[in-house]
Amino acid sequence: MMLNGVRRSVHSYRNDHAAASGEAKMTLKDSMHLVSDPENLDKSVHEVFETMLGVQCRPEDRAMVVPEHPTAVSVTAVVGFGGILSGACVIRCDASAACAIAACMAGMEFETVDDVVKDAMGEICNMLAGTWKSKVPDLASNCGLSVPAVITGSDYNLHVQSPEFRISKTYAFNETRFEMIIVCDALH
Amino acid sequence: MSEVRALIVDDSSVMRKIVERSLRQAGLESLVVFEAGSGIEGLEVLRSKKVDIILSDINMPSMDGLEFVRQLRLQQLAPDAPVVMITTESSEEHVKQAIRAGAKGYIRKPFTADQVKERVLSLLSAV
């Protein structure tokens, strides 16, 4: 339901864009291997975190459970994709990791997940989504992004029904770990 | 370079701070920064403040960056100030849209301070 809500804000992008440019409808089916290539996510995370936070991110083999304790606060930022790909880019982590990410971006320390931390998480998700889609030429110009949505709290799940594909990976820098998810529920 | 007055339009306060920091790192020591959280707020600022350069996000709620640039040109607000779009959208089509709307420059997020410096200084020296 959450992803549907995000997606609605960019739902008309493809038709508007095609009408404006006079182009025939694009299809991503032929470049599915490029779109679902996990290496694009690795490259995007590396590029965004090195450029904007000045840190080197490494992929981790073991999957992350967010939050690690059921009552702990976690932060999830979501940017929806609309157009020839429907889906979302998600970054999620615990509160301390969100504060660490925001601290690197803003150049100041945070002890709690305040509005600035949420803002930073939304922006980092926005840049990750934009960078990820720029790795596939068809996506770069035919897939729009929603404004970020940020969810904080505990005991919630992110659920998408029957996705076309889903890439989920854990990354870390210093002692900070976070999870990235690209979920695609339709390719056109 | 003499005092430079810049307007930064972005719905993210963190991004506004990062852009300001990049401008200061560009050697614009005598820098006056005005901030706006949306295109509508940006237009309000320009009704009362004179600026030398405008840096605007595109993807914003209520009034996006492209509409903001169209409106400021239509209303002849800051007619001599170049506009640089700073955005995650980087396809050729998005750049064309920004130029058509009236932008003079384009910086893709994520960006380095050097990229901001190069783009801003070249536009300011051309004014």
Image: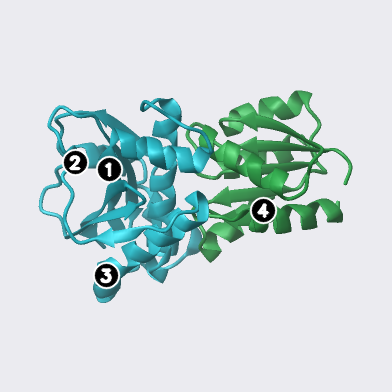
Pointer 1 with pointer 4, Cβ within 8 A: no
Q: Position of residue A122 (x, y in %)?
A: 40, 39
| Same chain shared by disc 4 and disc 3 | no
Counting residues from the start of the chain, the first of labels 2 and 1 encountered is: 2
Which residue shows up at 36% across the image and 25% down it?
A112
Pointer 2 with pointer 1, Cβ within 8 A: yes
Q: Amino acid at mark 1?
A: Arg
| Same chain shared by disc 2 and disc 1 | yes
| Same chain shared by disc 1 and disc 4 | no
What is the chain identity of the residue bearing mark 2?
A: A
Q: Residues within 10 Å of mark 1 (few under 14, many from 20)?
A: many
Which residue shows up at 61% across the image and 53% down it?
B98
A49 horizontally vs B37: left or right? left
Instruction: Decide which of A153, A140 is in the foreground and name it.
Output: A153
Q: Residues within 10 Å of mark 2 (few under 14, many from 20)?
A: many
Pointer 4 with pointer 2, Cβ within 8 A: no
Residue where numbered disc 1 is placed:
A92
Disc 4, SS: helix
Q: Residues within 10 Å of mark 3 (few under 14, many from 20)?
A: few
Identify the colour of chain B in the image: green
What is the chain identity of the residue bearing mark 3?
A: A
Counting residues from the start of the chain, the first of labels 1 and 3 encountered is: 3
| Same chain shared by disc 4 and disc 2 | no
Q: Position of residue B20 (x, y in %)?
A: 65, 40
Which label is found at residue A37?
Answer: 3
CA–CA distance between discs 1 and 3?
20 Å
Residue where numbered disc 2 is placed:
A66
Which residue shows up at 59% across the image and 56% down it?
B112
What is the chain identity of the residue bearing mark 4?
A: B
CA–CA distance between discs 2 and 3?
24 Å
